[in-house]
Image (cartoon, grey):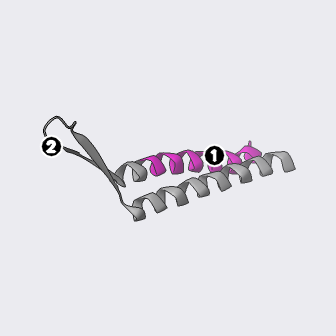
Amino acid sequence: MSEWLRPGSELALAVVAFVLAAVCWNAGTNTAPYLAVADGAPPFEVTAYSGSWILFAAALLAAAGLLIVDAIRLRIGD
């Protein structure tokens, strides 16, 4: 039982990191609709990105990847 404790907890932390990365990514994007500028032109949307939120999401994804690799290493190494 205890040989699964550390890899299992690392996988659980990786899932939490993935969820937090998705939340941070969504917090880092802002879409604003605009009306048509000229007659006959279609309306459009502008998306603005916040670099700090996107960077934090990328760091969380990297950490999740490392946790998954380490969990696999722990199980294969036994």
Across the whole image, how many numbered discs are drawn on residues? 2
36 to 60, vertically: above or below: above
Q: Residues within 10 Å of mark 2 (few under 14, many from 20)?
A: few
Considering the image in quadrants, where does the N terminus appear? top right
In this view, which residue lies farthest toward the bottom?
Answer: 52
Is most of the magenta stretch helix, strand or loop? helix
C-alpha separation, residue under disc 2 versus residue under disc 1:
53 Å
Front label number (2 vs 1): 2
Residue 51 found in image quarter:
bottom left
Q: Residue furthest right?
A: 78
Q: What amino acid does circle 2 point to?
A: Ala
Label 1 near label 2: C-beta < 8 Å? Answer: no
Range drawn in magenta = 1-22
Amino acid at dot 1: Leu
Would you say 21 lies left or right of 63 here? left
Which residue position holds label 2? Answer: 38
Instruction: Report the residue at 67% width, 56% height from top.
Output: 66
Q: Which mark is residue 11?
A: 1
Looking at the image, which residue sits at the far left?
A: 39
Label 1 Cα crowd, 10 Å radius (few <14 / some 14-19 / many 20+): some
State the image coordinates of residue 77 (x, y, percent, origin top left).
86, 50
User: For this rendering, which residue is in front, 65 or 6?
Assistant: 65
Query: At numbered mark 1, what does the secondary structure look like: helix, strand or loop?
Result: helix
Which residue is at 70% across, 48% downward? Answer: 7
Across and down, in percent, residue 11 comes to 63, 46
Say which residue appears at 27% left-offset and 44% top-offset.
45
